[in-house]
């Protein structure tokens, strides 16, 4: 079960995802469950030695006028394959409430795609711009979505994700030699800032136009991104990430058992 006892989305939530291409789930993790998640994450970004070789960390030098905060003191800005760090992180990927939400969004057969960490340490500046994830993660059909778990309150001035609702209905041309969109071609007049609290989850369709903001606050904003796909979406980009293609639901039923007492305790 999830932290709020639900396995599926409401009819209104499903309709919202289909219409807008993204869905905000406030307070998905809270209380002791959220605290455990934050504690495990703190270990992940501070105890970086002797991790599996197929995990990778990236770090950011503190910009002038900023210092790392105590929650992310090494200024870890990115990580790939955090799922390989141990059973807790496998449980985070296979959390049945998230898997159930993806079933409601895409259908009964869901697989894992990849896991990563994208942090915004103090002074972080995003250089990517508006983009769709689709050019980075080509499959036979665009039946993929990212579930972003936010560990900190994040608003516009702290690097919040911005999305353009209803932009998931077509793939737009990318800039020459790049996977980002041609920025001047993007109509961002309807853009929405995903203002989140710690423990919120935002699900974003692979075709939704979105971007990350800058973090000009003195506090690190930390987030975990797990991506999922339908079993029928065939990989065309040679995915070699940890646990890629792991079956998570068949016939609408979650498959993976819990490996730890997190959430269930």
Image: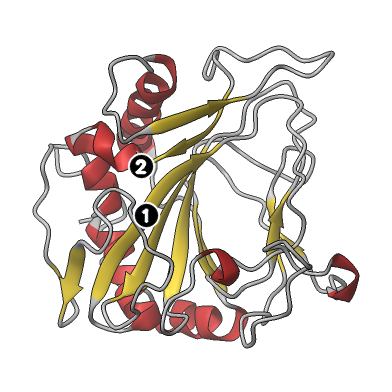
Mark pair 2, 1: CA separation: 7 Å
Residue 213 lies left or right of residue 60; in this view the side is: right
Q: To which residue does mark 2 refer?
A: 81
Expressed as whole percent of the image width and height from the top left, the position of residue 167 reads 68, 80
Q: Residues within 10 Å of mark 1 (few under 14, many from 20)?
A: many
Tell me how many marks there are: 2
* Residue lying farthest to the front in this orientation: 177
Q: Residue at x 73, y 21 (%)?
A: 218
Q: Is residue 250 above or below residue 4?
A: below
Element marked by disc 1: strand
Badge 1 is on which residue? 114
Q: Is residue 6 visible?
A: no
> Tags 2 and 1 in contact by the CB under 8 Å rule?
yes
Q: Position of residue 174 (x, y in %)?
A: 73, 71
Q: Going by the image, does 3 lie left or right of 160?
A: left
Asked which quadrant contains residue 53, the reply is top left
Q: Decide which of 114, 197 is in the foreground and name it.
A: 114
Q: Residue at x 61, y 38 (%)?
A: 153
């Amino acid at each position: 079960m999830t932290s709020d006892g639900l396995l599926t989305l409401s009819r209104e939530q499903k309709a919202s995802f289909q219409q807008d291409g993204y869905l905000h789930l406030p307070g998905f993790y809270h209380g002791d469950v959220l605290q455990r998640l934050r504690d495990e994450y703190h270990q992940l970004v501070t105890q970086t030695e002797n991790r599996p070789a197929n995990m990778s960390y990236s770090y950011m030098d503190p910009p002038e006028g900023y210092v790392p905060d105590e929650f992310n003191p090494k200024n870890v800005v990115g990580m790939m394959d955090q799922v390989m760090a141990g059973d807790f992180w496998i449980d985070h990927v296979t959390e049945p409430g998230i898997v159930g939400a993806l079933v409601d969004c895409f259908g009964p057969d869901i697989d894992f795609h990849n896991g990563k960490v994208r942090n915004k340490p103090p002074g972080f500046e995003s250089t990517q711009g508006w983009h769709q994830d689709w050019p980075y993660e080509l499959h036979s059909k665009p039946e993929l979505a990212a579930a972003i778990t936010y560990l900190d309150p994040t608003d516009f001035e702290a690097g919040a994700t911005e999305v353009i609702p209803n932009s998931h209905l077509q793939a737009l041309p990318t800039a020459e030699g790049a996977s980002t969109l041609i920025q001047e071609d993007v109509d961002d007049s309807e853009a929405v800032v995903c203002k989140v609290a710690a423990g919120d989850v935002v699900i974003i369709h692979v075709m939704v136009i979105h971007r990350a903001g800058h973090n000009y606050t003195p506090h690190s904003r930390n987030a975990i991104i797990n991506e999922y796909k339908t079993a029928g979406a065939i990989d065309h980009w040679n995915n070699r990430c940890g646990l890629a293609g792991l079956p998570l639901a068949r016939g609408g039923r979650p498959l993976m058992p819990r490996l730890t007492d997190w959430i269930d305790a």
